[in-house]
């Protein structure tokens, strides 16, 4: 009859169990961090697509606060500051030099014409400006479109769902790594 001996290295098992709480805490931190980053990326894409902006412009107005080891909570906030019209691909003469054709802007898939507006550079800032009626050449004021925060609010549920799914998926992967390291 053949004998089979089964032996367990109890010291390795004890060490793995001692280190498990630290590894689990690290896995939770990494999972929440990954979920926050993924939700931040998705929010930039969704808002940019909805508003007709470049993703970089939208992401610049969306701030992500990543978790820490003491506070395992990620946050994403969008600015309520309006975006300058020039960021929406404003088209028109630069500068108009009195030709007065106005400026055309495409916001959220809709084209809008600003008949009295013009594109120029003030200081080092290029923008879409308009003169006050009957005030002569000055003062001028810059024109703005909607804020990223307004669109972000409408996409909040989708962004939150995506972030939560990413946390769960990453947590499964991290726990699998921990359990695979015990063997």
Image (cartoon, grey):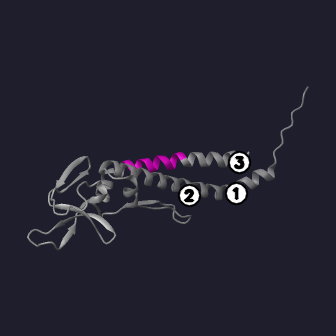
- Callout 1: 10 Å neighbours few (<14), some, many (20+)? few
- For mark 2, give the secondary structure: helix
Foreground: disc 1 or disc 2: 2
**Helix, strand or loop status at disc 3:** helix
State the CA–CA distance, disc 3 to disc 1. Answer: 11 Å
Res. 93 image quadrant: bottom left
User: Considering the image in quadrants, where does the N terminus appear?
Assistant: top right
Q: Which residue shows up at 29% across the image and 55% down it?
A: 88
Q: Is residue 134 left or right of residue 89?
A: left
Placement of 75 over or under 43, stated as above or below: below
Considering only order in the chain, which callout, 2 or 1, is on the residue closer to the N terminus? 1
The residue carrying mark 2 is: 29
Q: Where is residue 127 in the image (x, y as percent from the top left)?
A: 27, 63
Using the rendered image of the protein, determine whether residue 75 is visible from the camera's viewpoint.
yes
Residue occupying the point 51% across, 64% down: 71
The crowding category of the residue bearing disc 2, from other C-alpha atoms within 10 Å (few below 14, some 14 to 19, many at least 20), is: many
Residue beneath the point at 26% across and 55% down: 90
Residue 118, percent from left and from top: 21, 61
The magenta-colored residue range is 158-169
- Please give the residue where the numbered disc 3 appears in the rendered image: 181
Q: Can residue 146 be seen in this view?
A: no
Residue 48 on image: x %, y %: 35, 51
Viewer-proximal residue among 76 and 94? 94
Circle 1 residue: 19
What distance separates the C-alpha of mark 2 from that of mark 3? 18 Å
Label 1 – label 2 distance at C-alpha? 16 Å
Label 3 with label 1: CB-CB less than 8 Å: no
Do the residues bearing badges 1 and 2 touch, measured as CB atoms within 8 Å? no
Question: For the residue carrying disc 3, how many other residues have a C-alpha within 10 Å: few (<14), some (14-19), or many (20+)?
Answer: few
- Looking at marks 2 and 3 on the same chain, the residue that comes earlier in the sequence is marked by 2
Estimate the x, y position of residue 121 in percent, counting from the top left.
29, 67
């Amino acid at each position: 009859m053949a004998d089979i001996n089964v032996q367990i290295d109890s010291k390795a098992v004890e060490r793995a169990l001692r280190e498990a709480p630290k590894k689990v805490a690290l896995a939770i931190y990494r999972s929440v961090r990954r979920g926050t980053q993924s939700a931040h990326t998705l929010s930039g894409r969704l808002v940019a697509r909805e508003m007709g902006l470049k993703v970089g412009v939208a992401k610049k107005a969306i701030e992500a606060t990543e978790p820490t080891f003491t506070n395992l909570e990620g946050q994403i906030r969008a600015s309520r500051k309006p975006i300058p019209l020039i960021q929406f691909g404003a088209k028109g003469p630069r500068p108009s030099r009195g030709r007065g054709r106005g400026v055309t802007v495409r916001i959220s898939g809709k084209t809008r014409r600003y008949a009295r507006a013009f594109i120029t550079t003030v200081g080092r800032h290029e923008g879409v400006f308009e003169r006050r009626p009957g005030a002569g050449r000055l003062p001028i004021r810059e024109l703005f479109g909607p804020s990223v925060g307004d669109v972000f609010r409408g996409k909040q549920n989708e962004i939150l769902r995506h972030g939560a799914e990413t946390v769960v998926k990453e947590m499964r992967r991290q726990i699998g790594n921990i359990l695979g390291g015990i063997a």
